[in-house]
Amino acid sequence: MKTPNVRVRRVPASATIITLAAAGILAAAAVGHAAPAALQCHVELITLAPSTATTGVEYGSTRCGALLGSGVQQDHFTIRPVSATAGTGGGHYRQYFDTGTIAGTFHLAFQATTSAIRYHGGATITSGTGAFSGARRSETLTCSSHDGGSRSSCTATIILTRA
């Protein structure tokens, strides 16, 4: 059987971190924080996509400290190049934690240089289950990849609120 030609794409992994950040916001709200709580999350992603595709899937781990803990994330994305080194993208994500899940949408822009691909954008939580039921939030994120996009690292600072 022939193995399909698959490579990691230079796709914005920031979506993943955005998702994580949203999850963190929900967790704080779920534990009864009356006032908004600040939270920082870190996501490590691996992007898989056919070499000619402008759509794909990312998988990775998320870490949001003691309040939310660690989990996994999956996202589906579409990228829209505007040049050989820049473009925009977006998609939807879901994060899985011990006490529930968070789902939402994300958007981002990316710029490639000779040393890295940098991503920035935002995300919106659209639903949650378990401890994250009723969570809604928007956040910003920053990501980078130093290997052409196959592995990305993201950080998001979030303010947690509850709907």
Image (cartoon, rainbow, N blue to C red):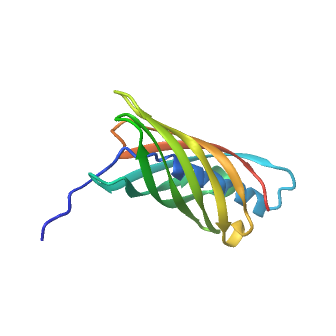
Q: Residue at x 59, y 54 (%)?
A: 20
Point out the residue furthest to the right here.
Answer: 34
Point out the residue furthest to the top here.
Answer: 114
Q: Is residue 107 left or right of residue 145?
A: right
Q: Quadrant of the N terminus?
A: bottom left
Q: Quadrant of the C terminus?
A: bottom right
Q: Nearer the viewer, residue 162 or 66?
A: 162
Point out the residue furthest to the left here.
Answer: 1
Residue 137, x across and y down, in percent: 71, 54
Residue 92, x across and y down, in percent: 53, 60
Residue 53, x across and y down, in percent: 32, 54
The answer to whether any part of residue 160 appears in the image is: yes
Residue 38, x across and y down, in percent: 74, 45
Q: Residue at x 68, y 72 (%)?
A: 130
Q: Nearer the viewer, residue 93 or 77?
A: 77
Q: Nearer the viewer, residue 115 or 30?
A: 115
The answer to whether any part of residue 63 appears in the image is: no
Q: Is residue 10 left or right of residue 93?
A: left
Position above or below: 135 against 16: below
Q: Is residue 86 left or right of residue 157?
A: left
Quarter of the view holding residue 135: bottom right
Q: Residue at x 32, y 56 (%)?
A: 49
Q: Residue at x 51, y 60 (%)?
A: 72
The number of numbered badges drawn on the structure is 0
